[in-house]
Structures are given as C-alpha cells and as structure tokens.
Image (cartoon, grey):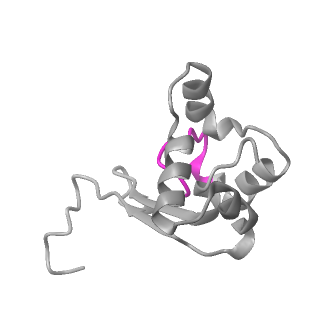
Amino acid sequence: MKNFCVNPYYNLNLSPNDDTMQGYATPCTSLDLDNLATFKRQDLIKKFEQGYQPKECSRCWTDERNGSESKRQADNKILSAWTNKSEQTLYEERHTQQLLTFQYMPSNICNLACKMC
C-alpha cells in the first residue's frame, strides 16, 4: 500500500483538448503523458498493483522526494475524509470499479454557457 493512489481506481478526469476539441479521460490531472492516444488506465493500475512508481506519475514522486505533499497524498486524504473510510479500506476495496469522483475541466473554448449542449 506504500505507493497507493486513489485516482486510478476511483477518479475520472475529463479535459478537452484545445487543439482538436476532442475530450480525453484520465484518472488524474497531474499525469505526465507522452502520448495521450495510447494511454490506458488499466496499464497504470497494473503498475501500481506491481508496486512500481509509474513514470506517468512523476510529478507526485518528485513532490514527495522534495518533501512536499503530492496530489496523490492529498487526494488519498481527501477521498478518505469524504467517504469516511480509511486509506487502508480504500486500498482494500480498490477493485470494486466504483467511480467516486469526477472532475470536468472545460477549456476556454467551452464554458458550458450555451444552450446547445
């Protein structure tokens, strides 16, 4: 449970790509992705399951090495408090495939103000 992060298991982040107007879904806003088209959430989960520190999560690992609280650590605490479950319980229930948080980040192209959506 040392490297556990709630985001690949419980979170979905939807952000539009400003260039193409197509949205993309990732489990976290801090992922460092080389190629978004080939990203697979299950591959990230597999790396966490094997005890690795996925390179896609390098921002969090760097923050933690530098003594700062990372998004991973903050999100673990926030979801634990929000669900009234310990981080250990969230870890044990991680395969329930239950989405607990959804984050939509519109770009400056879409602000959800029109009536067409």
What residue sits 69% from the left and 48% below the top?
4
> Looking at this view, is 29 or 74 the one in front?
74
Q: Which residues are magenta?
A: 27-37
> Looking at this view, is 51 or 30 the one in front?
51
In magenta segment, residue 71: no
Camera sees residue 64: yes
Across and down, in percent, residue 12 comes to 51, 63
Across and down, in percent, residue 96 comes to 70, 75
Camera sees residue 31: no
Q: Main secondary structure of the magenta part?
A: loop
What residue sits 55% from the left and 72% below the top?
99
Taking the image as shown, residue 16 lies to the left or right of residue 8, namely left
In magenta segment, residue 29: yes
Please, which residue is most extreme toward the right here? 50
Q: Quadrant of residue 8?
A: bottom right
> Looking at this view, is 109 or 77 the one in front?
77
What residue sits 47% from the left and 54% below the top?
78
Taking the image as shown, residue 15 lies to the left or right of residue 24, namely left
Query: Is 3 rendered above or below residue 39?
Result: above
Across and down, in percent, residue 79 comes to 51, 59
Query: Is 113 rendered above or below residue 65?
Result: below
Across and down, in percent, residue 18 comes to 33, 51
Q: How many marks?
A: 0
What residue sits 24% from the left and 79% below the top?
117
Please, which residue is most extreme toward the bottom here? 116
Q: Quadrant of residue 27?
A: bottom right
> Looking at this view, is 89 or 5 the one in front?
89
Taking the image as shown, residue 74 lies to the left or right of residue 90, namely left
